[in-house]
Image (cartoon, rainbow, N blue to C red):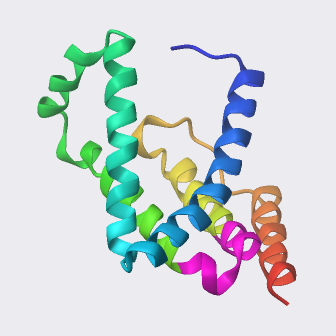
Amino acid sequence: MQTSPLLAMVLVITAGAAIALQSPLNAALGRHIGSSLGAATVSFGVGFALLLVVTIAYGHGDRLMESVHAPRILLTGGILGAFLVWATLSSVTVLGVLTMSAILILGQIAAALVIDHLELFGVAPRDISPTRLLAAGLVAAGVVLSRY
C-alpha cells in the first residue's frame, strides 16, 4: 500500500495522538481490572482481533503464513509493541501524558539516530550530524520543560 508523503504525515500525527490517548485508556483499564499486565494483554488482544479482520478484509490473510519463513529477528516487533503498551500504561499515571509522550519521543529519536547511522533493517543511511543531535537535544529539553 503506497502512500503520499502528506498522507504518511497525517497518519503518523494521528498515530501519535492515538498513543497519547492509548496510554491513559490502558492505565484506566489496568486500574479497573487490577493489573497493568492484564490491561496490556487485553489491549493487544483487541488490537490483534481488529488487525486480523482488516487483514482478511483487504485480501492479505493468506500472506500471514509467510511470517513462518521470516528471520526470527523480524518477529520481535510484537514483543517491542507489547513492551511499549505495558511501559506507557504503567508510567502515564506517574509522569502524566505530556512528559510520558515527550520521553517516549526522546527514546524514539535516540534509537532512530543509531538505526539510521547503522543502516539497520534496510533503512537508508543518514549520518549523526550536529543538526540531528541538536534536534534530539531540543526534544530532551522539552522533556525537562514538560516535567519541571
10 left or right of 48 in image: right
Magenta stretch encompasses residue 102: yes
Q: Is residue 11 above or below residue 130?
A: above
38 left or right of 138 in image: left
Residue at (51, 14) in percent of width and height: 1
Q: How many marks?
A: 0
Q: Residue furthest top?
A: 59
In the foreground, 130 or 32:
32
Q: Quadrant of the C terminus?
A: bottom right
Give residue 107's quadrant in the image: bottom right
What x and y, as percent, mark residue 117? 56, 52
In the foreground, 79 or 134:
79
11 left or right of 68 in image: right
Q: Is residue 67 above or below residue 127?
A: above
What x and y, as percent, mark residue 119? 48, 44
Q: Is residue 35 above or below residue 118?
A: below
Residue segment shown in magenta: 91-103
Question: Does residue 88 appear anywhere in the picture?
Answer: no
Q: Residue furthest front?
A: 32
What x and y, as percent, mark residue 43? 40, 55
Report the predominant secondary structure element of the magenta stretch.
Answer: helix
Question: Does residue 3 appear anywhere in the picture?
Answer: yes
Give residue 10's quadrant in the image: top right
In the foreground, 87 or 93:
93
